[in-house]
Image (spheres, rainbow, N blue to C red):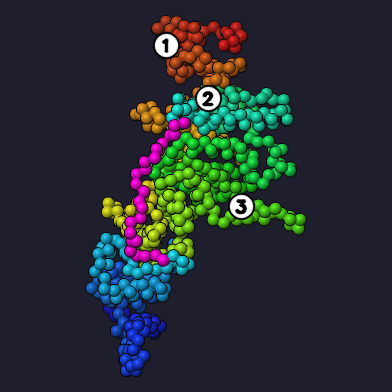
Amino acid sequence: MAAYYTADQVAKAKRKLDKIFALPNREDPRAGESDDSDEGGTDSSEDLSAESIRPENNAEGEGDGVASDGGECNEDENEDNFEEGDVSRKSTEDEDDDGEGESILGDDTDEDYNDVEDDDRYSTEEEDDGDDQRAGVHVHPDTFLSKDKKIEWSSEPLGERAQRGVPEYPTGPTGEAIAGARDILSCFLLFFTAELEEIVLRESNRSTYEGSSQKSMDETNLRAYMGLLTLAGMYRSRGEATSSLCDAEHGRTIFRATMSLKEFHCWSRMLRFDDRKSRGIDGNSPDKLAAIREVWSKWSERLPALYNPGPAVTVDERMVPFKGRCSFRQYMPNKPAKYGLKLWVACDAKSSYAWRMQAYTGKEAVTASKSTERAAAKTEVNLASRVVLDLTRGLEHRLVTCDNFFTSYDLARRLRANSIDLLGTIRSNRVELPQELLTARGRKAFSSRFAFTELATLISYVPKRNRTVLLLSTRHSTPEINGECKRMKPQAIVDYNHTKGGVDNLDKLLATYSCRRMTKRWPVAMFHNILDVSVYNAYVIWRETHPEWMSGKRNRRRLFLEQLGHALVTPFILCRKQTPRAESARALMRGIRSNSPVSSRKRQRCQLCPRSRDAKTCTVCMGCKRYICGKCTLHFCAICSGIDGE
């Protein structure tokens, strides 16, 4: 069926043809000498009618000339006519896609983009382009400039860049970590060192001495407190009240055997990490992290000292859930925890070991003048680049993967100077990108376009119609397509999918067995995060230094947490003077003090009663280690039984 065009479309097509046929005349220096040739060229263009202007299909199935203004080409390459209603359907679909917020910056009516396609149409290399189209790759035959006119991109590879091979440097736990990982408790103490314990005890006891007559906290109390937090995370009781955990009937026996509920709340109230008087006038310090700065700095220095990441490192952000009052609390609706404290994290892409962390404290506050009541906020310039450079300090010959918040051409240049490759998605509004690779209209699904410079490679991939994905890589230097993927993804996208989830996986693992409790103080929330990350990193070091430990079990991390929690609370149970009222807690305490392998959960028949009575019990005699029921037990106080003298 014939297609009809408006007068504006015909006039625009004439201007395009005039531009095409006028190119040889401008190149010929004798073009101005012959009036007949000029008149002939003008007549040939003016005699064109609407019937002589037919939409044609290029090598990629895109509409060229008039077809780019509206209209969709048929799937059959031998047919050049439009069907009725294609123009209206095309415009409606474009409006819907734009309304959904798709990442499309280009437009088919853009003059620069049409010039590139006109060159493709009249190029002598159509056969080669057709082969690329069948492979899912489209390479522009020309070079093109970025939006800021400072970077020249080429459609052809500019030679092989120096590739990063398999690293020869050591990966995994360092020598210090291997020497210190004697048992599970020593792995944890590699991160939460004696120096950190001293700081927490000093500042917590300082608040006790100034405010009340409560007893001071010592090392055994602090470790028992952290052990109960670890066990609470192991039981996945993050939302369960502490009173429920210590309940005599429905609670956990280990909590009542360790300390009372009142004592646990006492240590929670006492917990401090700095001297408030040292912050400045009225306790206000220019450092927003002053309340926990000393502990945070010394702890974060231990993370890279105990582990060497592998060839791929992931840089991303994560949130520490917190809804209380805090000057740098963030709101991120796309995160599982919408309100919280933001952390920049660099971790190993394979093991998710948290290698380096940095807290984000918001915009820098400028000192307020006398005429203004509130201080102004100063936005940091190039925040994303500064964060990546800080987190990757000390790394060499690695691949850093990050998302479009961080990726930029300038960051790739600065990382390359440090012998680090960059791979990440990039936003389409970056000025260093060429306009020709941003558009998705008219392109087939699963098609790819490449652009190259001496530094980086830009990939434009269409996962579905009218949607593009942009990647920037300094590792990949050729237009390589993964043949095993049904969607014809470039190899750079496949590598990005394999290395992008390091921080997200860490966030998921920490949330599974998190020790955090409900609190209104953000330093305590940060302290809970320190415990979570320290326990997980200790588990990674223990797992890699002792691969034979629990090799056949799938719940190795849960068993690690259980053994670590018991190792932290055992010294406090051994020196506890008061005996718990619950029978199960007393039995557990006696079992721990007598080093009995029998736990309170195991029940056997009483060895003093007749067999016909079949009395089951979990109580063990501290002397002969035999199971005895309640009728065969004599009760003594703690003084007469000699428990307090042990």
Q: Amino acid at mark 3?
A: Lys
Crowdedness near tag 1: few (<14), some (14–19) or many (≥20) residues, C-alpha within 10 Å: some
Q: Quadrant of the C terminus?
A: top right
The residue located at (52%, 29%) in the rendering is 189
Which image quadrant for residue 547?
Answer: top left
| Closer to us: 145 or 110 | 145
> On the image, numbered disc 2 is attached to which residue?
568
Q: Give x and y (percent) for residue 175.
A: 44, 32
Residue 407 position within the rendered picture, expressed as x and y whole percent measured from the top left = 46, 55
Q: Residue at x 69, y 25 (%)?
A: 214
Label 1, secondary structure: give it: strand
Magenta range:
152-176
Q: Residues within 10 Å of mark 2 (few under 14, many from 20)?
A: many
Q: Amino acid at mark 2?
A: Leu
**Residue at the farthest right position:** 370
Above/below status of 244 relative to 34: above
Q: CA distance from mark 1 to mark 3?
A: 67 Å
| Left/right of residue 58 with respect to residue 256 in the rendered view | left
What residue does disc 1 label?
605
Nearest to viewer (mark 3 / mark 2): 3
Which secondary structure lies at badge 3?
loop
Main secondary structure along the magenta-highlighted residues: loop
